Image (cartoon, coloured by chain):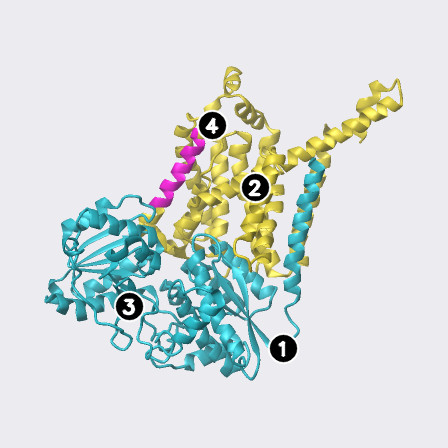
Amino acid sequence: MKRAVTKSTLLWLLVLLIALLIPVVVENKFYMHTLILILFYAAVSGSWNILAGYAGQLSLGHAIFFGLGAYTSTLLFMNGGVSPWIGMCAALALCMLVGACIGYPCFRLKGPFFTLATLAFSEVIRLVASFWKELTNGAVGLNIPFQAGFSNLMFRGKEPYYYIALGVLCLVIAVTYWIDRSKMGAYLIAIRENEEAADALGIPITRYKLYAVLISSGLAGITGVFYAQYILFIEPEAMFNVNFSVQVALISIIGGMGTVAGPVLGAVLMIPLNELLRSAFSGLNGLNFFLYGIVLILVVSFIPNGILPTLRGWLSKKRANRHSQLTQAIPGTQKGGGQVDSAN
Amino acid sequence: MKRWLSFLLTGLIALTTACSGSPAAGGGGEKEVLQIGALYPLTGSSALLGDESYRGAELAVKLRNQNGGVAGGKTVELVKTDAPDANAAQAEADRLITQKGVKLILGSYSSSISFAASEVTERNGVLYWELGAVSDQVTERGYKYVIRTNPPASHFSKIEIDYIKDVVAEKLGKNPSDLRIGIVHEDSLYGTTVAEFVKKYAEEANLKLATIQPYNLKSVDLSSVVLNVKEAKPDVLIGVSYLNDAILFWRQAKELGLDVPVFIGTGGGHTMSDFQKALGKDVDGILNVDFPQYEINKEYTPGLDDFVKLYKDTYGEEPRSGHSLANFMGTNVLLDVIDQVGDIDPDKLREAAMNYKLEPGKSATGWGIQFDEKGQNKLGQPYVHQWIDGKLVVVWPKGAALKDVTLPMPKWSERQ
């Protein structure tokens, strides 16, 4: 067991090292933009994964926290000149508060009803943002004036955005990793698998669901701040969009829900595919969505558990095969099988 | 089975990667070809009119190339890209600039796409030539490399109020300050922007605002809006709607017997031929302020007939709206400017554009050209149209008008 941990830690460090070095090699702005989007979507989807993948509360309203984060820092910056870095903290606090307010009453609802409630909340917040014109400038949206500088979280080049997105993603992964390895992760998974049984075992269900929603919404809020500072234009239609919530969920579902690396894998596969298809088929309107849809259908129907768990299952099956072949080839060594396995 | 699938998936991804690689590689080389990026929403909810807008730009370039190109025989090539939302607009602008090396991007029909894309072009010193997005903010941000040929939303509202003051009041035999104005508008970006400006200009002109009724564009019942308007009894009702809601409003206005002497639509749904198809004769008499459509005084719009002919030859159908015409006109101006400069250099193009002058009545839309220091064209204006016998005919301003306006609208009880 200890061996396996160090192995995966090494793999994570290697990926991180490559990620840190990428901007040194890649200069093309379009590729940089795609890379930033990958990091960004992996982070949002990672925050969603904590609530949906671990705690099993399938939310389709994550755009609420994402949009709320974006609006919080932007309004603070435009009206009060508050640095988006501080805005990020404010967004974190506000999103956690709203997450708790939405989550607490909704946790009584199970399965599709919880999902529907989150959908409804996201529509309500979109309408509030569209109609509270004095505060949000309504449907017209907010244009953040471009003033480059570290304290303003705005940069001319793409590299600083890349590293900030990477930082946010690392935070999300670290939190997920911690949950995965801690008692909390086990509790959440127990709640996901069978709420009655978890209750019978004495797990404080509502409290742990609340923890999950607090962490999840807070992290999503931070990604929202990043997005606003990157695109520099936010509007209710784009920020509180149901499609965005669905896309965020899809990335985790495809990569593998309830795993640390699933959202990252999903984003690495799906985001470039989306961007490539669009630029490849710009001559034929809509063909990109057609192909994207086909890929989604194929993945969901053939690998419903997501790519990562399927890949793991496949690998361990292969290992088990080799193991059984090995043990069959040398009769009388069945007892040593475990050692062979761990050596592999 | 699963192995088979993974091969298929990787094959698909490899294929698309290969496809995207090949056109990018063909970029540089020949000096005679000048590349311009074309950024429009070609998928998603704005696809129909985004595509219609793109056709205008495409035809202007085609026509120019047929007639010998620009700057002594250089041909112009549009690099078409799809930007269904703000995020995609930035990605595509980045791609055009870095992969294709374009120094000039035109577009874009939708204001949010224009906002997002021009953030990227401004930072890269690339010129953004806007042909159709109407939000005032596009040029109000004071960006150096943004130029817009079409009139912004505030001009639509200004024309409506001017028209009410100058023409409607007299036709109704009333003093302008006695007129009661109502507004019905959908509550997204477009409707809100126009309505705010109508309110502002109406107050400046001392017109009375009887009622303002916002509604959601996806509503399936507008009877409360119709009844509120009926209650307020406006002399002039200004509407800002997309297609489905415009049709719904008029059906319910007929059912509930809402008679307004004058109705002025603001482009969008009130312009489209589908609006007329859905409501038949009931549209007759409705006024509409929009980009120039096709029933117009042809002497005021030289080149319009050629455009319509070229459009039919190329796409095998009538133009679907005036968006293509406005984009056609703006692209022609751009090509003239490129012709003067001889190359695509954003700074020189901007300078040449600032010195470019065209009187009204000399272009395919009848618009003149004179850019202010923010890059906004001062001499482009929307026209007042009226639905007459199922056609949208220009009735104001005088130079462009084909027919005289008939006001007030007949009451429902007086219609056949």
Q: Residues within 10 Å of mark 2 (few under 14, many from 20)?
A: many
Q: Amino acid at mark 1?
A: Lys
- Circle 3 is placed at which residue position? B393
Residue at point 66% right, 48% down? Answer: B12
Question: Disc 2 and disc 3: Cα gap in Å?
Answer: 51 Å
Q: Secondary structure at mark 4?
A: loop
Apparent colour of chain A: yellow
Q: Along the horizontal axis of the image, is A255 left or right of A131?
A: right
* Residue B101 in the image, given as x and y percentages of width and height: 59, 68
- Circle 4 is placed at which residue position? A111
* Residue A83 in the image, given as x and y percentages of width and height: 45, 53
Where does the magenta region start and end?
Answer: A113-128
In front: label 1 or label 4: 1
Q: Residues within 10 Å of mark 4 (few under 14, many from 20)?
A: few
Q: Same chain, marks 1 and 4?
A: no
Viewer can see residue A156: no
Q: Along the horizontal axis of the image, is A15 left or right of A139?
A: right
- Circle 1 is placed at which residue position? B31
Apparent colour of chain B: cyan
Question: Disc 4 and disc 2: Cα gap in Å?
Answer: 20 Å
Residue at point 27% right, 78% down? Answer: B399
Please report whichever mark, 4 or 2, sits nearer to the chain's N-terminal start: 4
Q: Amino acid at mark 2?
A: Ile
Q: Which image quadrant: the N terminus of chain B?
A: top right
Viewer can see residue A296: yes
Residue at point 40% right, 33% down? Answer: A117
Question: Disc 1 and disc 4: Cα gap in Å?
Answer: 62 Å
CB atoms of marks 1 and 4 within 8 Å: no
Report the chain holding disc 4. A
